[in-house]
Image (cartoon, helix red, strand yellow):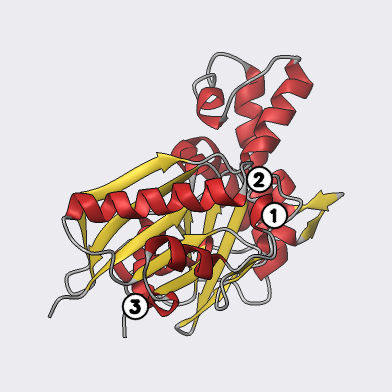
Amino acid sequence: MNNVVTGIDIGGTHITVCKIDLNTMEMLEASRFRSDIDTSESKEHVIEAWSKAIKGCSFLDDGEIGKVGIALPGPFDYEKGISLITGLNKYESLYGLNVKELLSKELNIPVTDIRMMNDATAFLLGEWKAGSGKGCKNIVGLTLGTGLGSANCFDNVMEDGDLWKMPFGDSRAEDLLCARWFIKEYEKRTQKHVANVKELSLMVGEGIVASQLFKEFGHTLGEVLIKRYSNNFPEHIIIGGNIARSWNLFYPYTKAALQRHGFFPNIIPATLGEDAALMGAACLWRD
């Protein structure tokens, strides 16, 4: 039976689309389509850019769009398809709009053929079904990048996480566990600008500041996890997102912070990487 759906991962700077065969859990690479997105643009521009990418995937696949699963950041009413994103410097033009209906019209497909979920939850679902979380119970998934995403799966029940807004210190967890923290802190301590975390990671070994920032980040991550999950600590923690590419620079400090408090979870990097959210979004259409 044909069970191919269109998986979509929408981030703060890009959209990636790929057809996925849910019978084999295989990504049909020939259909993969990715493009950059200017999230500050008008609603017409954003919806048109998303639709162009989705149509591009179907063109490469030489088939129809079919059922669609979309992973995208919140806050969002995923069931109704209404954007609640405001004050986050991204997709402001979509606030209060029914994105499902807008896409349905632009793609000429029924609105019932579009399903949505939080991108961090999609990440964990994808890793749970086809990645490093297969066969695991009591899992937490984290995405570390432009923001902090989280999701929980306890006793086979998948839930959106709330780690990003948890108060921590004089701020909230996301403010200390995202790319802009690295950029802001490096500039504050050196009076020099760095473009992104990848650039900063290449400086480790050349100076004290870069190494110290990754050490502090890893320690903070451990302390945040303890505060949030100490009453019901997960057996497995899967970490993805762009910052996870610098795994070796911060993970030892996260592990040490957890162990000092008597927690010994299995902390592992995502196997599917950026494809985890694509896979998870497609799994919205699994029985």
Q: Position of residue 144 (x, y in %)?
A: 56, 48
Q: Amino acid at mark 2?
A: His
Q: Earlier in the sequence, mark 1 or mark 3?
A: 1
| Residue 182 position in % (x across, y down) | 66, 33
Q: Is residue 172 left or right of residue 243?
A: right
Q: Which residue is mark 1?
A: 223
- Rendered residue at 61%/56% (across/down): 258
**Is 159 or 224 nearer to us in this picture?**
159
Q: What residue appears at the point 49 percent right and 21 percent down from the top-left corner? A: 202
Q: Secondary structure at mark 2?
A: helix
Quarter of the C terminus within the rendering: bottom left
Q: Specify the amino acid type for callout 1.
A: Glu
Horizontal relation, residue 218 to residue 47: left or right = right
Q: CA distance from mark 2 to mark 1?
A: 6 Å
Q: Is residue 32 above or below residue 110?
A: above
The image shows a total of numbered marks equal to 3
User: Mark 2 or mark 3, which is nearer to you?
Assistant: 3
Disc 3 element:
helix
Q: Which residue is mark 3?
A: 285
Q: Is residue 10 above or below residue 39?
A: below
The percent coordinates of residue 231 (x first, y second) are 68, 76
Q: Residues within 10 Å of mark 2 (few under 14, many from 20)?
A: many
Q: Residue at x 44, y 83 (%)?
A: 156
- Nearer to us of marks 1 and 3 is 3
Which amino acid type corresponds to the residue marked 3 in the rendered image? Answer: Trp
Q: Identify the residue position indicated by label 2 in the image.
A: 219
- The part of the image, by quadrant, that contains residue 76 is bottom right
